Image: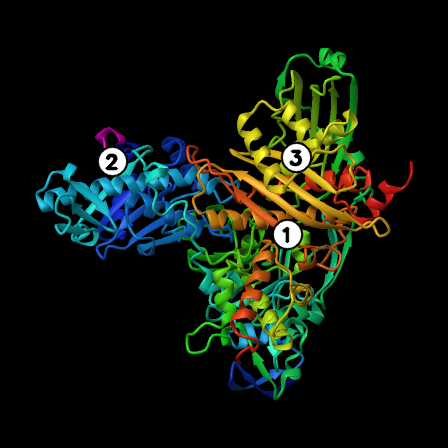
Amino acid sequence: MKETIQFKLNGKSVQMSVDGERMLLWVLRTDLSQTGTKFGCGEGFCGACTVLVNNEAVRSCQLPVKNVKGKSVMTIEGLAKNGVLHSLQEAFIDHDAMQCGYCTSGMILTAYSLLLKKPHPTRQDIIQGMEDNLCRCGSHTRIVQAIQTAAGTIKGAVTK
Amino acid sequence: MKKEETRTHVLDEAGAPLALRRRDFIKLLGGGIIVCVTVGDAEALFQEQVRRQGGGMAYPADFNAYLRIGEDGRVTCFTGKIEQGQGAVTALPMMLAEDLEVPLESVDIVMGDTDLCPYDMGTFGSQTIRAFGPALRAAAAEARAVLLELAAEKLKIPIDRLQAKDGAIFDKTRPQTKVSYAELAQGKKIERHVTPKPPLKTPAEFKVMGRPIFRRDAKEKVTGKARYAGDIRLPGMLYAKILRPPAHGAKLKGIDTSAAEKVGGARVVQDGDLIAVLHEYPDVAEAALAKVKADYDLPDASLNDKNIFEHLIKVAPAGRAVAQSGNLDEGAKLAAQLFDETYLNSYVAHSSMETHTALVEFKETKATVWASTQAPFRVKDEVAQALGIAAPNVHVIMPFVGGGFGGKTRNTQAVQAARLAKIAGKPVQVAWSRADEFFYDTFRPAAVVKIKSGVSNSGQIVFWDYEVLFAGERSSQQFYNIPHHRTVVRGEWMGGGASAHPFDVGAWRAPGSNTNVFARESQIDIMAAKTGIDAVEFRLMNLTDKRMERVLKAAAEKFGWTSAKAPSGRGLGVACADYLGTYLVTMAEVEVNKETGSVQVKRVVCVQDMGVAVNPEGAKLQIEGCITMGLGYCLTEEVHFKGREVLDLNFDTYQLPRFSWLPKIEAVLLDSPDLPPSGGGEPAIINMGAVLANAVCDATGARLYQLPMTPERIKSALKPK
C-alpha cells in the first residue's frame, strides 16, 4: 500500500509516496539514488547497509521505510559538510582503513554512532561497537586505528 | 635507449585489416605520445586474442597495455587489469611515474574497460605487480626516451646533456632551459612499441617506488561516491532476482508463477534453466520471486561435509610428480623416526562483501556491461556468446569491485543479466542475494594431503613423500634440504573431474597454497616436537636456502622467539612458505580455552621478502588483510552441505572473522632491493593454517589435522585418547 512518508534525509526534507513496508535500504538506493549505502547480506548480519536514524546506527535492510516517518536519516553521502570531510572520513583515509571499500560506508556510520555515545572509547569499546560489521578484506586493524584517531581529534564531540 | 629494443607495427604483416584497425585505434586516442607494451610473447597473445574473439578483431591485439602522454601533459595508463581493493590502482601509477619522471599526481589510470584497454586475461594470481609492472615500467622508460629525443630536437641540445625530471626535460648545464612533456606532446602523434627490456632505474634511483603512498581511491570510498556495479542506474532499467534451485543438479519438475505475476509491475521470465522475476525495484522483484512455487527432483544426497574426504580419496585421479630427488626407500631406511599423517581442508567460500553483480544494456546489436568481475575480457566473450553477437560489439566497463579473492573470475551473473536483458528489451541488473552467492560461488576445494616423512637421529629430515589431492601444485614443493623426496599432485584446485566435488570449485586467494602450507609446516612441527628440537631451530637445521634462512631469523628476532621443546604451553607457532617469488615467515601466539575449545589469536608477526616493495604501505595493508582474512578459514569457515545442497545461506552459519578476533599484527617487509617486485596480495594468507595449528598444539599438546579448527574439533582433539 502506498502512503505518503516524510522524513529528513541528510538534512533535507523528503516527501514521497511509497509502500511503507519496503525496506529503507532499497528506497534509498533506488528511489532516492543514495547508492553509498550498500547491500551486503540482506538479513542484518554484515552492516554494509548501516545508516543513522536520529543518530542511531541501524541496518537499513531490516527497517521498513514507514519507521523513519518524521525522523532524521543520514547516509554516508550526508557526512561531509560543504565538501569538507568529517574527521572520521579523514581518519579512514589517513589510516588506509579500507581495501575494496564496500563495507566502508557502514563502518564509518557505525563508528559515528559509537563516538556519539562514547566520545572517548577504549580499544575494547571500539571492538565491541564494531563487532557486528563485517569486512572481508581484513582492514579491521586500520579501522580500529582510524576510529581511535578520529576520537582523539574531535575531542569528545562528534559534530553533527 | 637502443633502437633494437623498440619495434613498430610488428604485426602489420598479419594482414591489412589488422593494420587498419591499428590505425583506427591509435586515431581514436587523439594526439600525443603513445607507447604500447607487451607482457610475455606477443605472438601468443595475438593468437589468444584472435581465438577468443572468434577471428574478429576489435583492436590491435599484440600488446597488453599502453600509456599516453597527452597534449596537456597528463599521463594516462590503460590496462585490462582491475582494482578489487588490493591497491593496483595506486601501485601501477607509482611504477609508471618512477620511470617516466613525472609527478605521481599527473598520472591517471584506466582499468579493465574493454573498449579502452587492450586484452588482459584477468586479475589474479598475484600477477599484476610481478609480471605486468615491469612491462609498464619499460613503457615508461621508452616514453622518456622518446621525450628526450623530441627535446633534443626542439632545444637543439644533444641528448646526453638533457635530463628528465618532474614532467619536463632540462639542460643539465643550464637548468633554466627546459621544455615540459606537455609542450613536447603538442601536435604530435607518435606511436611506439616496446618489448621489455629498456634500461629501468635501479632501486637506488627510485623517487616514487618504495615510498609509502596512501590509496588513490580512498576519498571516493569514504564519501559513498565510489560506484560499484550495483550502483549504476540506466533509464528504464529492471532488477532481476533469479530463482535458485534447492541444490546443485536439481531438475525442475513443475512451476507455478501465477502469484508472482500478480505483483504489480513484476514480470516473470523463463529461458530454459534461467527463471527470474524482473521489476523496477529490486526488493519488489525479490518479494515476487518468493511467491514462485517450484518443484524439483533432487539429485543423490550421499555426500556431506563429513564424508567428503573419504570420497575425495576414492575418486582422486592419478598423480604426477612435480618434484623428486633421491630414493624414498633409502630415505626411509635412514630415518630414526617415521611419520605418516593426513591433513584435511574444508570447502571455503569467497564471501566478498559485494555479491556478484552485473548490469547489461542490449541495444540492437551492441551490448554494454557493468560487472563486478576480475576478468572483464572473459565477461566480454561470455556475454557475446549469450547474446549471439560478435565479441567486438560488447563493451565491458569496470566499476569499483567490492572484493574478489578469485571468486569474481567466474561471471555467471553477467551471463544471466545478458540473457534477461535480451528478453526484456530493457537494461537488466542481476545482483545475487547472499544465499545466491553461497550457491553459485566457486568454492575453494576441499582437499586432502598425505605426508610420510622421516628424521634421522641428528634431526635431519631424510625423506619426504608428499601427496596432495585436489589442491594442486602451488606451494606444494618443500624447500628444505631433504635428500630423498617426492611431491605428487593428484587433482587440481580447479575442476578436478566432474565426479569429485558436489559443486563448482575454483580459485580462492592463493589457490592450493593454503592447503599445501598447512600440511607441510604442520608436519615439520610434528617432527621437530618428536625429536625434541625447537621448531625454529629444527627448520634452520634443515634449511640451506639462504633467503629463507634470512627471513626466518628476522622473524624470530622481531617476534622474540626463544628456544623451547614443544609443547611448551606458551601457545607459539611458526610457519615458513614461498609463494611465486615471495618468501615469508609467520609467527603467532594463541590462547586456547580448553573448556570451550575457542582460540584467541593474540599476536601475529609476518616477515615478508617480496623483492622491491613498490608501495610498502600498500604491501603492509595486504599482509594485515591476509592475516585477518586467514583467521576465518583456520578457525570457523567451512561450507556445510548435504548432498548437493549448500546449507549455508548467510553469515549467521558461515562465520567470517570479526573485530573481536583481532590479534596484534606486525607486518615487516624485509628489504631486498636487488630482487624484482613480486606480488603481495596473496602470500601472507598461506601461512595461517600451519602457524595457528602449530601454536594451538604448543598451547595444548593437541594436534589439529583439519581446518577449520572449530571449537568442536579442538575439544575433540583435547580428549584423552
Q: Is residue A103 above or below residue A66?
A: above
Query: As drawn, is B344 to the left or to the right of B25?
Result: right
Please report whichever mark, 1 or 3, sits nearer to the chain's N-terminal start.
Answer: 3
Residue tagged 3: B517
Residue at 41% over, 74% down: A83
Chain letter of disc 1 in the image: B
| Quadrant housing the N terminus of chain B | top left
Pointer 1 residue: B664
Element at label 1: strand
**Image height check: is B236 above or below B460?**
below
CA gap between label 2 and label 1 equals 53 Å
> Which comes before the other along the chain, label 2 or label 3?
2
* Quarter of the C terminus of chain B within the rendering: top right
Chain under numbered label 2: B
Residue type highlighted by circle 3 = Val
Q: Secondary structure at mark 3?
A: helix
Drawn side of residue B638 relative to residue B96, left or right: right
Could you tell me which secondary element the residue under label 2 belongs to? Answer: loop
The residues colored magenta run B1-5
Task: Tell me: residue A61, above or below residue B341.
Answer: below
